[in-house]
Image: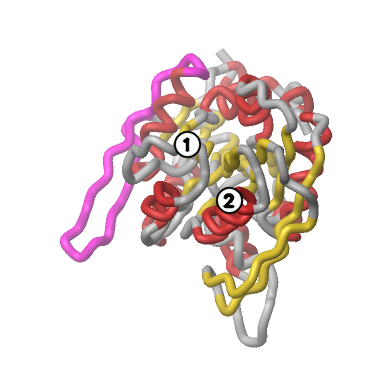
Amino acid sequence: MPSSNLPPKLFGCSQSMELAKNIAKNYGLELGKVQTTHFSDGEFQPAFEESVRGRRVFIIGSTFPSADNLMEVLLMLDAAKRASARHITAVIPYFGWARQDRKDKPRVAIGAKLVANLLQAAGATRIMTMDLHADQIQGFFEKPVDHLYASTIFLPYVKSLQLENLTVASPDMGGSKRAYAYSKYLESDVVICYKQRKKANIISHMELIGDVNGKHVILVDDMIDTGGTLAHAADLMMERGALSVRAVCTHPVLSGNAYEKIENSSLTELIVSDTIPLKKVTSKIKVVTCAPLFADVMHKVHDNTSISGQFLM
């Protein structure tokens, strides 16, 4: 059988192994075997335990810190390239370092561009990711980028809640485009939070643009890190008369004491995807898996068919 007609090979990186297994299950294949050798100084070396010559390879791994997660993806891409894989797709559900997408002050790196260069140099011939922190990061690549939207999995769940007097909110000005896209699908109003920061992750002031009185509010964002912004926004909205506040965030970074902030906030529910595994399970966090979405798009990529039907917005 010609190699182009053979099924692809799917491999998971250690930091995303549960998601990779779920994607493979939805795709209808077993994950390929990888043996990783660990050295006493912390260095590691992944090795494929099966041939990938002439095959399409999907390497699944989010690149959230530590940097070892990015390094593992790079090493597996390089291994696939040197093993003569025909096409190598880096499936990166959460594209880490994406907040460094521009020079916002002198003498800093553009980390997202650096990561894009590294992925391509390592051997990626295609990139598949979801809800980039900034859409323009796609332009950092010279290879095709399949940029998926978590709205495809979140909007059906939000509609299933059957909330009346629904309002969509953005926790900052930068997320207004995302909020308007959700509101168009849900046929709701939009509220924007205007915030000022003392420094990264510390808010000095927040104000609402719009009315939340008597409304069920859905806050939408691409990620939740320390949880401070969403907790502050939820508390402020409840003070302004909101009936309930839920948050929809694609990537649950949840660093520091974020879990405690969410539990102690006015949020009714935090809805996230499984692009990053949760460190612990809490009563307020609902996980909606992105595995079927990635598996379906990977099928379409392998079959060279359109993926535009997967976008709800």
Please name whichever residue, 37 or 100, is drawn nearer the observer in this view of the structure. 100
* Magenta-drawn stretch contains 38: yes
Circle 1 is placed at which residue position? 274
Q: Is residue 32 left or right of residue 133?
A: left
Q: Which residues are magenta?
A: 26-50
Classify mark 1: residues with Cα within 10 Å, few (<14), some (14-19) or many (20+).
many
Which residue is at a point 44% across and 49% down the rendered structure image?
A: 262
Seen from the viewer's position, the closer of residues 114 and 291 is: 291
Q: Residue furthest left?
A: 40
> Are dots 1 and 2 in contact, CB under 8 Å?
no
* Kind of residue sitting beneath label 2: Ala
Residue at 63% of width from left, 71% of height from top? 205
Residue 75 can be seen, yes or no: no
Q: Secondary structure at mark 2?
A: helix
Task: State the quadrant of the C terminus.
Answer: top right
Q: Quadrant of residue 117?
A: bottom right
In the structure shown, which secondary structural element does the residue marked by tag 1 occupy? loop
Residue where numbered disc 2 is placed: 234
Q: Is residue 297 one of those drawn in magenta?
A: no
Image position of 8 with respect to 257: above or below: above
Which quadrant: the N terminus? top right
Instruction: Report x, y in % for residue 194.
Output: 72, 64
The first of marks 1 and 2 along the sequence is 2
For the residues labelled 1 and 2, the Cα–Cα distance comes to 23 Å
Q: Position of residue 303 (x, y in %)?
A: 68, 20
131 vs 261: above or below: above
- Residue at 66% across, 36% down: 216
Three-letter amino acid code at the position of disc 1: Asp
Query: Which one is in front, 234 or 259?
Result: 234
In this rendering, the label closer to the viewer, 1 or 2:
2
